[in-house]
């Protein structure tokens, strides 16, 4: 990202001779104060930039700018000289995205209707980050940070500031950085909760960007042709986005996990935004896709706490995914950098921000080089911010931001001494000049003499009171050179507490004591020069004392306890993940009973041939046998069917199945939030399903758009999509949509009117656009364009027949109602879902041409399903409706074959006809029967091998193939199980080995789940059973 | 019409039976219109069938005779000449014992989402004094639907709290709850505390492990205390004329004395092990209900001879990394470990009719087929204390049996006839009635034949 308009100002400012912004300050009222602003840090080790190191060098700065740096640099005579012998100077660290909460915001007349959309916030106008936060950052070596608001979808513009202590010194290097955005949702229900799903947040972002474009276009028209046009309304949010949509202002996209980043890229590409991602730290879990985004990432070092594995029962629940994430998280920055991603590090998302340097060292232990680490904190963030000519290295003419460290900042026992910002020194820790350690002689002017052992750093003073006994001073405090402590009077032959206060000077202490009776006396500690042996004793004693720290010392070694993490990762991370997705092969299956589900019926002793992912032959075995190079599968005694389809699924949907806040949410898209990592995908493959219709829930009359995917486990979401399935959308009638409190509709009457109102609006919308587009360009230039409305656009697509409705419904009255609405608006409904009273109006459904996707035998879970019968499917089929059975459940989806068998049991369908309910019929309903649903030449090579007749309850899916690639096989499953078991044990052992040595640091941490802190977002969690038929599911699963 | 249907003779036979009930009209829900069968008035002989005795050999071309509700003869070939007997030719058909649903709340809940139709969870955590039998609605629509798939005997239980009350074993046909009762107060329902941290609808934080453990221990302590108090009361009551009566503890008597079984809901290994240890200490008779980790506790179960009612197989694996078929292979592991178990549906009573299909999954995943069948017939009967009367086709046992077109574990198998205690049961249901009613609609419209 670049800030072309702002850099110029910045450079000019550095060349101004007089102090900046003097005119802003008032006249001096009293004596003028002069600040020396020329300094020389001499005799230091200077890291000029990553990879360039000077020993014994000097750094000269003046007025906040580096004047010169090098070994032979002259020290100007006016400069204050700081001896840095033995110290190392690094360029100041830069946090490219520090998130803070700017607090409550007052609503303004130009505010956006949704309170998560406030791009008009500009951090330059907001209070600076707390002084305490700035201090905390300095203590870790940070000298500057780009600061952003942490809440909202459009959060506002950041500012890049110095992290100085005084507010007036916390200068803004850039008063306008990126526009921060995120897919943030509200965690509540009700009418003002929009968006309360991730897909809702994505939809709102998309609509707002279109609105910004529309607003700009309208404003332009008005500016040119005010006559005859109404002025545009005040829209601060849309105004604030103008720079962004025109690429003058980059976007900082805060993503909650790796999948979120991939999702975000779709919006980014749609609007051609100039984006940098503020990552999650979990990018390694989808590394290839993240790298392919070809964007910069600012990533946190929020390494998860080790999962609890000591308790045997608790450990049972710890998944391999959690364990692997724990083990691999420290490799994240290194993996990204080595793969060519531009990476900056941020202190965000840590449970405790001060863990940053510790975690950085952990990352280095996991093979991040020190140069890479330094670059990701200096030159890389500077480059991302477009100010690499001003910040990031210690070169002449750059800003004098640097860190002075005792030791290497990348090692544990180092100590940050000073952080310099704009040439001003911020002391972090005292130099050792006032620390003394060793054996001393203690004298008082009252004639007392004792031997004492002192270590001021450890705040320990121990008096040798004879007979090997030691008496320790209490409440030892060391403030710079002032030392105070209390001592039991017995050491000085008195009773009570004796108070001491002295100054450290050189290698001695001198001061005043107060006896219990109030008498004052003088004391000194002087080094005990004579007893050389004593020092050894002390050394030994302190070693003993340090016993607790011993294990931590182990951490210092380069070795990772329990062994380094494996380099190769699987997709998805966790059990049953694959190192690479299955590859399509040319396959020749023979000796099988093939249920073609097409004209050919059931072929005994049949042969199925697949070439390049497509079926080339189904039937008797060809005379030549298998062509050269084909994989031959002998399926003797086995049955083969097309891959099963599930026409109603909520598996693999991130961030909520319902956008239940509004009664119409046709703008939201399940396709935006597909989760390829859901392990239920794998389980469904193991049940013979390989294509599903992912639907929005049924909380509102008009829900969101659907997604049709094939279960290409191990692949990407893009791999999974079935682009030639017709676009669809979820509608819902009856109890569910009317159940939401405080919102229209409350009755079936209201459900109809909500739908009619929406379609009426959509028709009007279409008419507006049609009229507008029919105008000549000349006329169009002079009038305001219509607004693009994604909600109505989806409904227009329905009216035009480009998108079909999948409508949740139960009772015959509501089914008939929607048919009449559709008739009135001139479109055909795709499917009725559930449609448990469909058998009562099957004639109307058939006549209208809608499909019916029903449950095999669910009933009794609520009032509107009391007339549900298991004969529903068969009877509708008999009357001529295209019928499918669906699961609406990640669990039931594993047995769609035996669900089909229920149409034989209830209603006496022919077995082939029954199996159509989960093969060709749902394919027809999704308009992909030209590709899948039956085994016929030219169709996709999607098939399942069964141990028995697929309608038998004894049948097991043995193999599941998609487009000639093997996605499930019992034998491979056996291997994957073993691998998961072994890996879990290995990593749990590693945790146990490490916890032995890290007891102390473990104690410090909480028990929180791995993931982000309070940032309004959480990593997407794999929770299923988030079923729309919640009530129904409870009845089914919850038999207590 | 295309070759869409394979309407066989059995279908018509069934439809005929159903049509007679049609004349009564369709029902409003919650009021089944199936007429309870009269007592067996003449001997019945089912012949020319395959008799699956379950306890013994399967008899091809066999017969089974029963009179006054009791099986009187079983054999192969021509049936004995029994005076006044009604002969039923079951050529090509199969006879099985009636299936047993070991964990339901049939009759106690009509509609899932309508709490006013629920009668299984009384107020309070310890309510042993309640008995669910008196709340069982004999006219529930759920019973005929369940029965139609061959399930003729069921345990119906209260739930909720720690001690929910006393359950009942019922026959699925009768005019009143007294008619239904086989054992009116069969067992006590006790929920062992859980260590699992549950999240509300999958949201919010789980409790931390220490907190969960603490609550678990406290929960067990409450149970110990209640049993301790009950024992103390019962002992005192037996030796005192003036002690006032406590109905809660009076209800506990047969259970504290180890005379009747306590159905302990426990799923995890530690829950099961600790529940068994609790029972041993107090000499209680228990049955584990749930048992998802019973395989891990199998040594304890076998050693102490504690049976398990496995509550359902059709559930997702317990953890992300678990084998996809972990719940399906559990019966096999229990069988191999020698644990006595039966299988319950785990679905909720409206879908109890799928018990046999759910059980088939165990066989698909390794359990021998006969063991799968036993787990919903004889094993269930034995575990429930009905081993002498139910669960197999044996002379002297009650004539509770079904006649089917094939293996009852197959979904595609139809149940043609059912007898409970020799009474000829109406296999019609609300579902069949509605099916036939709307077939009439399409016949009137000329859309179907």
Image: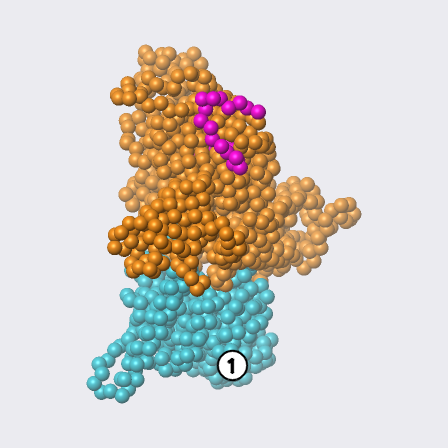
Chain colours: A orange, B cyan
Residue A86 visible to the viewer: yes
At 47% across and 76% down in the image, what residue appears? B306
Residue to which mark 1 is pinned:
B394
In the foreground, A21 or A758:
A21
At 36% across and 58% down in the image, what residue appears? A491
Q: Secondary structure at mark 1?
A: loop
The span shown in magenta is A72-99
**Relative to residue A144, is residue B128 drawn left or right?**
left
Residue A389: where, in percent of width, then height? 51, 23
Q: Is residue A85 magenta?
A: yes
Count the marks. Answer: 1
**Relative to residue A266, is residue A841 drawn left or right?**
left
Residue A112 visible to the viewer: no
Q: Is residue B377 magenta?
A: no
Residue A256: where, in percent of width, then height? 46, 41
At 48% across and 27% down in the image, what residue appears? A40
Number of residues whose C-alpha sits closer than 10 Å to that of mark 1, classed few (under 14), some (14–19) or many (20 or more)? many
At 39% across and 55% down in the image, what residue appears? A449
The chain identifier of the residue carrying mark 1 reads B
């Amino acid at each position: 990202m670049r800030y072309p308009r702002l850099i110029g100002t910045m450079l000019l400012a550095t060349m101004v001779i007089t102090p900046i912004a003097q005119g802003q300050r008032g006249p001096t009222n009293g004596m003028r104060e002069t600040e020396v602003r020329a300094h020389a840090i001499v005799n230091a080790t200077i890291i000029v930039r990553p990879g360039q190191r000077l020993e014994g060098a000097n750094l000269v700065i003046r007025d906040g700018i580096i004047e010169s740096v090098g070994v032979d640099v002259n020290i100007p005579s006016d400069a204050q000289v700081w001896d840095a012998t033995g110290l190392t100077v690094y360029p100041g660290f830069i946090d490219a995205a520090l998130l803070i909460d700017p607090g409550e915001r007052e609503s303004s007349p130009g505010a956006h209707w949704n309170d998560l959309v406030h791009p008009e916030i500009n951090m330059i106008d907001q209070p600076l980050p707390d002084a305490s936060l700035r201090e905390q950052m300095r203590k870790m070596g940070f000298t500057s940070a780009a600061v952003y608001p942490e809440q909202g979808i459009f959060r506002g513009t950041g500012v890049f500031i110095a992290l100085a202590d005084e507010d007036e010194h916390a200068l803004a290097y850039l008063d306008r950085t990126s526009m921060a955005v995120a897919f943030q949702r509200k965690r509540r229900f009700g009418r003002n909760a929009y968006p309360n799903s991730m897909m809702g947040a994505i939809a709102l972002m998309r609509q707002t960007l279109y609105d910004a474009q529309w607003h700009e276009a309208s404003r332009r028209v008005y500016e040119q042709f005010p006559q005859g046009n109404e002025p545009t309304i005040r829209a601060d949010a849309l105004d604030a986005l103008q720079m962004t949509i025109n690429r003058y202002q980059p976007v900082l996209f805060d993503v909650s996990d790796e999948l979120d980043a991939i999702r975000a890229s779709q919006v980014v590409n749609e609007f051609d935004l100039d984006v940098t991602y503020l990552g999650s730290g979990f990018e390694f879990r989808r590394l290839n896709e993240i790298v392919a985004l070809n964007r910069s990432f600012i990533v946190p070092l929020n390494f998860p706490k080790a999962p609890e594995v000591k308790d045997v029962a608790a450990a049972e629940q710890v998944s391999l995914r959690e364990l692997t994430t724990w083990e691999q998280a420290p490799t994240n920055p290194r993996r990204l950098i080595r793969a060519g991603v531009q990476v900056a590090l941020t202190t965000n998302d840590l449970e405790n921000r001060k863990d940053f340097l510790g975690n950085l060292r952990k990352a280095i232990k996991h093979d991040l080089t020190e140069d890479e680490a330094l670059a990701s904190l200096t030159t890389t963030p500077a480059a991302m911010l477009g100010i690499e000519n001003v910040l990031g290295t210690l070169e002449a003419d750059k800003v004098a931001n640097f860190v002075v460290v005792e030791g290497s900042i990348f090692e544990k026992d180092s100590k940050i001494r000073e952080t310099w910002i704009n040439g001003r020194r911020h002391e972090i820790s005292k130099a050792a000049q006032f620390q003394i350690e060793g054996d001393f002689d203690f004298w008082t002017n009252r004639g007392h003499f004792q031997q004492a052992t002192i270590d001021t750093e450890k705040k320990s003073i121990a008096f040798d009171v004879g007979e090997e006994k030691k008496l320790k001073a209490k409440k030892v405090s060391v403030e710079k050179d002032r030392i105070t402590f209390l001592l039991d009077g017995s050491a000085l032959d008195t009773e009570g507490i004796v108070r001491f206060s002295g100054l450290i000077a050189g290698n001695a202490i001198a001061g005043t004591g107060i006896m219990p009776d109030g008498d004052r006396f003088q004391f000194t500690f002087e080094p005990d020069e004579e007893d050389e042996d004593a020092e050894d004793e002390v050394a030994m004693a302190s070693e003993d004392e340090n016993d607790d720290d011993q294990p931590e010392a182990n951490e210092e070694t380069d070795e990772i306890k329990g062994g380094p993490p494996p380099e190769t990762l699987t997709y998805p991370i966790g059990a049953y993940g694959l190192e690479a997705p299955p590859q399509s092969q040319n396959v020749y299956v023979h000796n099988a009973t093939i249920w073609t589900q097409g004209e050919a019926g059931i072929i005994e002793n049949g042969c199925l041939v697949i070439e390049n992912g497509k079926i080339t032959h189904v039937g008797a075995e060809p005379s030549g046998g298998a062509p050269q190079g084909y994989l031959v599968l002998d399926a003797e005694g086995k049955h083969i069917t097309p891959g099963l389809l599930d026409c109603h699924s909520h598996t693999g949907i991130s961030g909520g199945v319902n956008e239940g806040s509004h009664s119409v949410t046709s703008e939201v898209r399940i396709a935006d939030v597909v989760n390829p990592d859901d392990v239920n995908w794998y389980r469904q493959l193991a049940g013979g399903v390989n294509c599903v219709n992912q639907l929005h829930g049924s909380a509102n009359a008009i829900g969101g758009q659907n997604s049709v995917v094939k279960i290409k486990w191990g692949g990407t979401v893009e791999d999974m999509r079935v682009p030639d399935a017709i676009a669809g959308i979820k509608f819902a009638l009856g109890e569910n949509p009317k159940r939401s409190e405080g919102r229209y509709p409350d009755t079936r009457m209201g459900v109809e009117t909500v739908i009619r109102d929406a379609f009426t609006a959509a028709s009007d919308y279409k008419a507006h656009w049609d009229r507008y587009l029919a105008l000549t360009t000349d006329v169009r230039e002079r009038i305001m364009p219509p607004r693009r409305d994604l909600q109505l656009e989806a409904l227009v697509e329905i009216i035009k027949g480009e998108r079909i409705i999948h409508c949740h419904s139960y009772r015959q009255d509501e089914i008939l109602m929607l048919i009449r609405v559709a008739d009135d608006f001139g479109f055909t409904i795709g499917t009725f879902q559930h449609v448990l009273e469909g058998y009562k109006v099957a004639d109307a459904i058939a006549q209208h041409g809608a499909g019916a996707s029903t449950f095999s035998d669910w009933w009794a879970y609520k009032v509107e399903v009391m007339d549900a019968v298991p004969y529903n499917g068969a009877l509708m089929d008999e009357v001529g409706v295209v019928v499918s059975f669906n699961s609406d459940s990640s669990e039931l989806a594993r047995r769609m074959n035996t669900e089909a068998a229920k149409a034989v049991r209830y209603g006496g369908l022919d077995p082939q006809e029954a199996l159509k309910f989960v093969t060709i019929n749902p394919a027809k309903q999704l308009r992909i029967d030209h590709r899948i649903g039956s085994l016929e030449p030219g169709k996709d090579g999607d098939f399942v091998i069964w141990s028995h007749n697929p309608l038998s309850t004894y049948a097991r899916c043995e193999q599941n193939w998609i487009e000639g690639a093997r996605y499930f096989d019992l034998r491979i499953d056996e291997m994957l199980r073993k691998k998961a078991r072994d890996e879990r044990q290995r990593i749990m052992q590693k945790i146990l080995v490490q916890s032995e040595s890290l007891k102390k640091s473990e104690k410090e941490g909480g028990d929180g789940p791995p993931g982000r802190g309070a940032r309004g977002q959480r990593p997407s969690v794999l929770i299923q059973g988030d079923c729309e038929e919640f009530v129904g599911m409870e009845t089914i699963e919850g038999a207590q | 019409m295309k070759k869409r249907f394979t309407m066989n003779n059995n279908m018509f036979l069934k439809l005929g039976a159903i049509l007679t009930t049609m004349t009564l009209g369709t029902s409003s829900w919650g009021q089944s219109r199936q007429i309870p069968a009269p007592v067996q008035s003449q001997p019945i002989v089912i012949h020319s069938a395959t008799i699956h005795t379950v306890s013994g050999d399967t008899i091809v071309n066999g017969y089974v005779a029963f009179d006054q509700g009791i099986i009187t003869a079983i054999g192969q070939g021509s049936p004995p000449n029994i005076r006044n007997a009604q002969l039923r030719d079951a050529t090509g058909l199969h006879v099985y014992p009636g299936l047993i649903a070991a964990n339901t709340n049939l009759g106690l809940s009509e509609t899932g989402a309508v709490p006013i139709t629920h009668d299984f969870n009384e107020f309070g955590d310890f309510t042993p004094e309640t008995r669910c039998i008196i709340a069982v609605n004999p006219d529930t629509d759920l019973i005929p639907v369940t029965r139609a798939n061959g399930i003729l005997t069921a345990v119906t239980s209260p739930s909720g709290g720690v001690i929910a009350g006393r359950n009942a074993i019922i026959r699925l046909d009768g005019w009143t709850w007294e008619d239904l009762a086989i054992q009116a107060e069969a067992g006590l329902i006790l929920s062992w505390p859980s260590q699992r941290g549950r999240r509300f609808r999958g949201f919010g934080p789980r409790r931390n492990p220490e907190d969960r453990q603490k609550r678990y221990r406290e929960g067990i302590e409450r149970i110990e205390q209640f049993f301790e108090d009950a024992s103390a009361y019962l002992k005192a009551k037996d030796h005192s004329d003036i002690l006032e009566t406590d109905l809660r503890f009076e209800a506990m008597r047969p259970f504290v004395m180890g005379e009747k079984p306590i159905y302990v809901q426990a799923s995890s290994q530690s829950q099961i092990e600790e529940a068994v240890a609790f029972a041993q200490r107090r000499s209680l008779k228990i049955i584990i209900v749930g048992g998802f980790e019973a395989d891990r506790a199998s040594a304890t179960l076998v050693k102490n001879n504690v049976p398990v009612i496995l509550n359902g197989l059709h559930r997702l694996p317990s953890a992300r990394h678990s084998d996809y078929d972990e719940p399906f292979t559990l019966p096999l592991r229990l069988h191999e470990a020698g644990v006595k178990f039966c299988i319950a549906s785990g679905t909720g009573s409206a879908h109890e009719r799928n018990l046999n299909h759910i059980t088939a999954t165990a066989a698909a995943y390794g359990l021998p087929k006969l063991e799968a069948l036993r787990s919903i017939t004889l094993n269930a009967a034995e575990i429930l204390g009905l081993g002498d009367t139910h669960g197999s086709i044996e002379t002297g046992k009650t004539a509770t049996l079904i006649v089917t077109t094939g293996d009852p574990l197959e979904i595609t198998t139809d149940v043609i006839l059912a007898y409970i205690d020799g009474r000829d049961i109406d296999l019609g249901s609300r579902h069949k009635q509605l099916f036939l009613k709307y077939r009439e609609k399409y016949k009137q419209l000329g859309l179907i034949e």
